Image (spheres, rainbow, N blue to C red):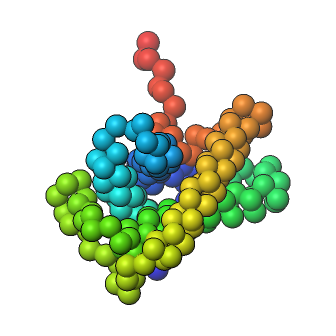
């Protein structure tokens, strides 16, 4: 497999996928927590959108994973301690795992549901049940519990990720955050 040469920043594709998926995941978590509340208006529509965006995250994350495997990430700062590098790598691969597992767990939960409610992605595309998963209240509850545990793990990882990025930006001042920014080069000084 050919690998692209590393630079000091992620590719524009990687940056776009990172921020798009990040916004979608945060929205999924917020609405996932709210949609179970009785007072939530239009709960059916919110559930359908949650499922739609969940499948969109799955597709985008698989694309991002393929992109990541084919494009070497920018190097970490040379002064970064080994333990931080290991935590960084573990956190990123755990993110990838959750980005794939969470939509699959949600899809499995819906597939096991005994309620005859079809899933229409963005009210257009029917989502079939996952093969091999029959209707079962016990299976639905099992997948629901795993999906919920995954959501709280996601929240913890996001907090860790944002905290580490802010530490590198404002405490270490090592430019690590710049790797995932849109800006490609420093602004040029105006010509005299």
Above or below 105: residue 6: above
* Residue 31 visible in the current orientation: no
- Give residue 137's quadrant in the image: bottom left
Indicate the quadrant containing the C terminus: top left, top right, bottom left or bottom right: top left
Residue 91 in percent (x, y) is at 66, 59
* Residue 55 visible in the current orientation: yes
- Which of the two residues, 95 or 140, is positioned nearer the viewer here? 140
- Judged left or right of residue 86, residue 65 is left
- Judged left or right of residue 120, residue 177 is right
Residue 160 in percent (x, y) is at 69, 47
- Give residue 113's quadrant in the image: bottom left
- Give residue 120's quadrant in the image: bottom left
Residue 111 in percent (x, y) is at 36, 73
Numbered circles on residues, count: 0
Q: Residue furthest bottom?
A: 132
Q: Residue at the location (35% across, 58% down)?
A: 51
Residue 171 in percent (x, y) is at 77, 33
Q: Residue at the location (37% across, 83% down)?
A: 134
Q: Residue at the location (35% across, 62% down)?
A: 55
Q: Residue at the location (35% across, 72% down)?
A: 114
- Which of the two residues, 190 or 128, is positioned nearer the viewer here? 128
Above or below 63: residue 112: below
- Which of the two residues, 82 or 34, is positioned nearer the viewer here? 34
Q: Residue furthest top?
A: 192
């Amino acid at each position: 497999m050919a690998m692209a040469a590393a630079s000091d920043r992620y590719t524009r594709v990687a940056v776009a996928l990172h921020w798009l998926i990040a916004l979608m995941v945060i929205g999924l978590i917020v609405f996932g927590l709210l949609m179970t509340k009785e007072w939530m208006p239009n709960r059916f529509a919110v559930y359908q959108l949650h499922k739609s965006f969940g499948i969109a995250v799955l597709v985008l994350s698989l694309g991002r994973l393929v992109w990541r495997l084919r494009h070497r990430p920018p190097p970490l700062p040379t002064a970064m301690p080994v333990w931080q590098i290991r935590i960084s790598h573990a956190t990123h691969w755990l993110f990838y795992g959750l980005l794939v597992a969470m939509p699959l767990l949600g899809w499995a939960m819906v597939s096991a549901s005994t309620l005859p409610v079809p899933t229409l992605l963005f009210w257009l595309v029917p989502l079939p049940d996952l093969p091999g998963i029959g209707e079962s209240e016990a299976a639905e509850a099992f997948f629901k519990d795993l999906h919920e545990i995954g959501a709280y793990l996601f929240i913890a990882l996001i907090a860790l990720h944002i905290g580490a990025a802010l530490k590198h930006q404002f405490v270490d001042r090592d430019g690590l955050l710049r790797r995932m920014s849109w800006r490609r080069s420093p602004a040029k000084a105006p010509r005299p």
